[in-house]
């Protein structure tokens, strides 16, 4: 982080500031674009009926995701501390309770829990770099390609090894300070991913099932929609945009005062959504052309894309490049997932960044063992009917992030004065009015209704 003092901000961050507006956008894009777009979005869309899910997802991005993201950045820039300290500080300045700091603490916990399983999946991507290089997918049948991910999942030693390597890499990058590696990593990763996705899109068009894939994704069939799948779409919107846990708040703390928050938010949301849709448009034609199951679950991407690479000329090169870039995308997200916990430990306990990164990394690595073993040694283990990975994923994406998001927008919309928020959003304008309406009413009420509906609370209240 360059140590440039805030030009007009009331307070400056303890960790320095982004060197430019672009640096901030790159960092937030780097956190948003990750496994959520390429690995998770297609499989949850597939498991929840496709098109209706996609439409609900897009709605959530627009009316909930965008206002929550703007709220997080503006609170972060006002507080300029780690999320716990920022919420406490800004709440006190606005004449509210210090207890708002708990929202930050919820976020710190969510980041640790998410990265614990995220690291295991990122480990699959690392393993697939080697599989690609050694030609494991070239000219192979769907059964042979599927056997690769099955073999990895069945081996606790390999799952643990890659999980450990990925966590080691994350700690290494975070310990060195966020800016150095991050800016350049995102600068080649996002364009690189885009180019490879476009190559894959062209391939998807030649599978003969392209239209079938598009139909699956974009012809709404609302009969497939349940209260549960609406909640999952909402949770996916939070997950994919990295919001609801203070990560964007932590990044906002390093944002120069003159950068436009609405513009930055819209740029990131568009880039993130575009990449998720693109990857789904590639995966489903491959699924249908090969008679694979769209509801395959978390390993969907690891069964489909290698199959496609194995059938195209230059497949080894494209496949290797792809998994290298996917691993980088996961790494730039992992940095964001660790940032609230690391910044908090540094500020609260006066540790060095390096010591904090190592300590937090060890905690996350330990929690992640549950996920690394959930497909082998612990495959019979169940919490409320879910395996360890699914339980942690459900708790974080579908409960902690939406809840954190409601608290964040309610705080920004109701507990901060219009004067404070509009000064952060670039002066009173139509944008502020629209943001306030969404942040005060639409986003919180929408999220609470979805949460109440899927937990059966709504039925209890209405007596249905
Ligand atoms: N958005 C990331 C992805 O799509 C995952 C994620 C969720 C995240 N919350 C985050 C990343 C917070 C950074 C910070 O892969």
Image (tube, rainbow, N blue to C red):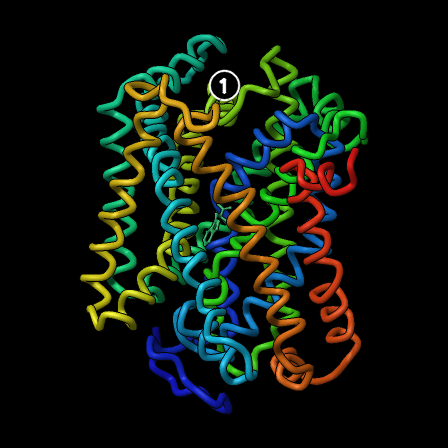
Using the image as rendered, state which of residue 242 and residue 99 is in the foreground. Answer: 99
The spot of residue 406 in percent (x, y) is: 61, 58
Q: What residue lies at 60% left-to-right and 41% top-to-bottom?
A: 276
The answer to which quarter of the image holds residue 174 is: bottom left
Above or below — where is 208 with respect to 418?
A: above
Image-based side of 387 in relation to 401, left or right = left
The answer to which quarter of the image holds residue 160 is: top left
Circle count: 1
Above or below — where is 206 with respect to 8?
A: above
The spot of residue 309 in percent (x, y) is: 48, 24
Q: What residue lies at 40% left-to-right and 53% top-to-bottom?
A: 337
Image quarter hosting the N terminus: bottom left
**Circle 1 Cα neighbour tier, 10 Å, few/some/many (<14 / 14–19 / ≥20):** many
Above or below — where is 241 with respect to 313?
A: below
Q: Is mark 1 within 8 Å of ligand 1?
A: no
Q: Is residue 135 visible?
A: no
The answer to which quarter of the image holds residue 234 is: top right
Image quarter hosting the C terminus: top right
Above or below — where is 451 with respect to 375?
A: below
Q: What residue lies at 36% left-to-right and 49% top-to-bottom?
A: 112
The spot of residue 196 in percent (x, y) is: 52, 38
The spot of residue 7 in percent (x, y) is: 47, 90
Image-based side of 361 in relation to 304, left or right = left
Q: What residue lies at 38% left-to-right and 50% top-to-bottom?
A: 334
Using the image as rendered, state which of residue 265 and residue 128 is in the foreground. Answer: 265
Q: Is residue 203 visible?
A: yes
Q: Secondary structure at mark 1?
A: helix
The residue where tag 1 is placed is 307
């Amino acid at each position: 982080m360059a140590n440039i003092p805030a030009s007009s901000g009331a307070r400056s961050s303890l960790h320095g500031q982004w060197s430019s507006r672009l640096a901030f956008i790159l960092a937030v894009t780097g956190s948003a674009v990750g496994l959520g777009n390429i690995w998770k979005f297609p499989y949850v869309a597939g498991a929840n009926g496709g098109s209706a899910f996609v439409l609900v997802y897009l709605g959530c991005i627009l009316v909930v995701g965008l206002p929550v993201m703007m709220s997080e950045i503006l609170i972060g820039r006002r507080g300029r501390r780690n999320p716990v300290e920022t919420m406490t500080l800004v709440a006190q300045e606005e004449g509210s309770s210090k207890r708002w700091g708990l929202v930050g603490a919820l976020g710190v916990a969510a980041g640790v829990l998410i990265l614990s399983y995220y690291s295991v999946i990122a480990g699959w991507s690392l393993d697939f770099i080697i599989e690609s290089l050694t030609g494991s997918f070239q000219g192979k049948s769907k059964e042979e390609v599927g056997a690769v991910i099955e073999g990895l999942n069945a081996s606790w030693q390999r799952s643990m090894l890659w999980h450990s390597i990925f966590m080691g890499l994350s700690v290494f990058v975070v310990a060195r300070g966020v800016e150095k590696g991050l800016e350049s990593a995102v600068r080649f990763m996002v364009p690189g991913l885009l180019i490879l996705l476009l190559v894959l899109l062209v391939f998807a068009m030649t599978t003969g099932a392209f239209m079938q894939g598009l139909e699956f994704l974009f012809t709404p069939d609302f009969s497939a929609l349940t209260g549960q799948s609406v909640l999952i779409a909402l949770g996916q919107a939070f997950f994919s945009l990295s919001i609801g846990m203070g990560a964007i708040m932590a990044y906002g703390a390093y944002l120069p005062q003159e950068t436009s928050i609405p513009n930055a938010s819209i740029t990131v949301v568009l880039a993130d959504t575009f990449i998720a849709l693109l990857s789904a448009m590639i995966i489903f034609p491959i699924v249908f052309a090969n008679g694979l199951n769209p509801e395959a679950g978390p390993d969907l991407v690891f069964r489909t894309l290698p199959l496609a690479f194995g059938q195209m000329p230059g497949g080894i090169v494209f496949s290797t490049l792809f998994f290298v870039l996917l691993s980088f995308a996961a790494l730039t997200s992992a940095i964001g997932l660790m940032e609230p916990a690391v910044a908090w430990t540094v500020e609260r306990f006066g540790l060095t960044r390096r010591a904090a990164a190592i300590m937090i990394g060890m905690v996350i690595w330990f929690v992640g063992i549950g996920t690394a073993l959930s497909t082998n040694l612990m495959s019979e283990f169940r919490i409320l009917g879910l395996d360890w990975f699914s339980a942690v994923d459900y708790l974080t994406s579908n409960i902690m992030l939406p809840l954190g998001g409601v608290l964040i927008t309610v705080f920004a919309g109701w507990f901060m004065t219009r004067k404070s928020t509009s000064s952060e959003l670039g002066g009173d304008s139509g944008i502020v009015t629209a943001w306030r309406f969404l942040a005060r009413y639409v986003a919180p009420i929408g999220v609470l209704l979805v949460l109440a509906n899927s937990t059966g609370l709504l039925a209890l209240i209405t007596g249905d």
